[in-house]
Each structure stands twice: as structure tokens, then as C-alpha cells.
Image (cartoon, rainbow, N blue to C red):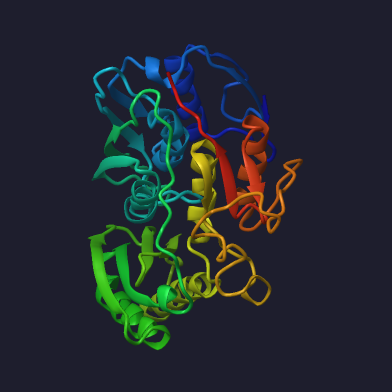
Amino acid sequence: MLNIKSLGLKNQHVAAIEWLAQVTEADVEGLSVGSKTVTFMPRRPPTELLQRNISIRTESGAASTMLVLQAMLPFLIFASNDTNEPVAVELSGGTNVAFSPSYEYFDQVLAPTLEERFGVKIERELKARGWSLGRQSWGSISLKFYPIAKGEKLKYVPPPQYSFPESFEVKSVDVSIITPMHSHNKLQESIVEDMGVLWPSADINFKVIEDSCSDSRWSVLLVAHSAEGIRWASDVLTSAPKNIKGYDRFVSMLSKKLCKGLYEEVSLGGVVDEHLQDQLICFQALCDGPSAFPRGDDPALDGPLGPLIDSMGNLQVGDGKMRREKTLGPFGHGSKHARTARWVVGELLPGAEFYNRGDLVKGIGFSAQ
């Protein structure tokens, strides 16, 4: 049973849980928009998934497809069958939605990390954009999942041993701009100028330049890459003020806010950004053995590499150097989402162990038969 505070379930939550309930033949109570308590008791494991072509459409174009996908991911990566057939998924709803990762973030940050660190392969394509800003619109994404073989466990692949500061030097920044056409030149100039102040030698790559066709729709993502393959991201989803007299100041402030946010992420000395950290916790808890994605809250307290740098190479647990955390409530480093995710995982998977404020997780080694 899950008790949900604040405003309760939203459209995207209901869409994801409805699908999971259908394919697992679950007994469910309290599943409706606004509900604050849900009981979910599945009867079938992921390996009994018969559907290999799945289509889900949220009730609102502003409902996030990325949040629906977050709920489906842990299930689908274990949904292998005897012929190792992939699972195709079509999701319709919002792709650029407030309080949710954008499709660009999923494509450029989360999906590559899942493949590199856990071997989770996801082919993906954006078919159409759906926004929570401006006129209602429906977006669509197409995905193909390659589940791990039946009976196999999710494995963590550790990165190379990092060293400071060499491994953390920003070598390049990918920029995705989905804003009104009239803003593109000025926004590109501002980002190049602001990035040049922070990282003069970094290459700036404009990965996506797209017309949002509305002053109500501004979505920009910056992804910094280090020499050793670390990624950090900073993004914004906003609207231009109504009755604005000139866009230059707005564009300049937008660029400075994004670049400042990216610089602050990199300065923490972690190996993930704030949003990636909370999205990886469930995979850490499911995988076989320890995994680490350290991200401190304060570099003055945590040091430039976070508290786990001496143990990241071997990922040893129980050597007397790490403190096991209690999971009685939200805890650890990171955002409210990250702290809450650790607590919820601790409730659902009591065999998972958390150390050093949650930066290191010893997973349960789940496998589906």
C-alpha cells in the first residue's frame, strides 16, 4: 500500500498503474486521479507479459509520457520471453511537461546511462511533441526494449576509476533548443558567451534546434560531458512573459540561469546530476550487488569527489568504512525525490541496503523466472 501526500495521483500515474495492473492481473484499489492511497497486488511476473506491442495514451496531452515510462521501465527490463523478443511501446501524451523530465533528457542522459551502467538497451524515437504549456497538444514517442534474459540478473558495470580534477573537466556541452524561431540566434549566442566564461576550452554542440511555434513554449537542455564520460544536465521549461517589450533581456537571463545551474551541478563533484540520481535508485536496488552514483549536497563538506571515491573502484560493502542507513523515512543526499525514492525502495525491497547517505546501494539481485 502506498500513501501519497500532496494532491494525489495525476493522469500519468493512473495511466501507468492501469497498464501495470492489466498485464500483471493485479488486484487494485484506489486507482483514480486525485487518489492518495493505492493498493496494488500483482499476480503475474514480467516474464508472463504476452503483449510485445504496447500502446498507451494518457487522458490529457499535458500528462507526461516520461513519468509513465518511469513506472514501466523496471517491469519491462525483466519482461523477457523464451525467444528473447523485444517489446515495442508507443506512448502518447506530453513530451515537454512541467515537473517532469523532457524527452531530450531521457534520450541524452537517462537512456545512455542505463545502457552504459546497467546494460539496458532502449531504442527510442520522438514522433511528435506534446506540451503542458500553450494550447493542448499530443505528443508521441516510440520505444523498443530489449529485456534481460529470463532468469538473469541486472548487472552494474562500474565506470573507470575517476581522478580529480582530470576526470571531471568539462570537455563539451550539448545544447537542445526548442523555442520560438525568432529566439534561436540570440539564444545560441548567449549560451556560447556564457559557456565561454565558465569553460573556455569546452566544445559547444547544438544538438537540437527546433521551432516551438509559440512564445508559451521554451524548452532548453544543456548536457555537459567530462573527459571520462560523466554527464551533468541543466534544463528549463518556461513561457515568455506576456506583453514582453523585448526578448533580448529574457533570452540573456534564461541562458545565464541554465549555465549557472549546470556549473553548480558540475561543481558538486558528483557523477550524476540531481534528476538522474533519483531516477537510478530503483535500478540500483534491483541489480545484483553494489552500485554507486555519488552526488554530494555541499562540496565543502563532501569533498570534490563525494564520500565514495575511495571505494568506487572495488565497491566494497561492509569493510567498516561505510555506514548503513536506516530506511524509516526519506533520507540521504540529493533532492526530495531522491530521498523519498530511497525510503520507498526500502519499504518495497527491504533486502536492499543503503550506505553513506544513499550514495552506495547494495541491490537484491532480482531475477524473473
Residue 296, how many percent across, how many down? 61, 65
Q: Position of residue 64 (x, y in %)?
A: 43, 41
Residue 334 figure quarter: bottom right
Q: Residue at x 54, y 54 (%)?
A: 315
State the residue in front, 252 or 204: 204
Residue 305, relative to residue 81: is it above or below? below
Image quadrant in which the C terminus is located? top left
Looking at the rendered image, the quarter that the N terminus falls into is top right
Q: Determine the residue positioned at 58% across, 52% down.
A: 316
Residue at x 37%, y 64% (from the top left corner): 220
Task: Inspect this view and state whether residue 321 appears.
Answer: yes
45 or 197: nearer the eye? Answer: 45
**Residue most toward the front?**
319
Between 294 and 36, the residue placed more toward the observer is: 294
Estimate the x, y position of residue 25 in percent, counting from the top left.
Answer: 48, 11
Compared to residue 236, the image places residue 126 above or below, namely above
Q: How many marks?
A: 0
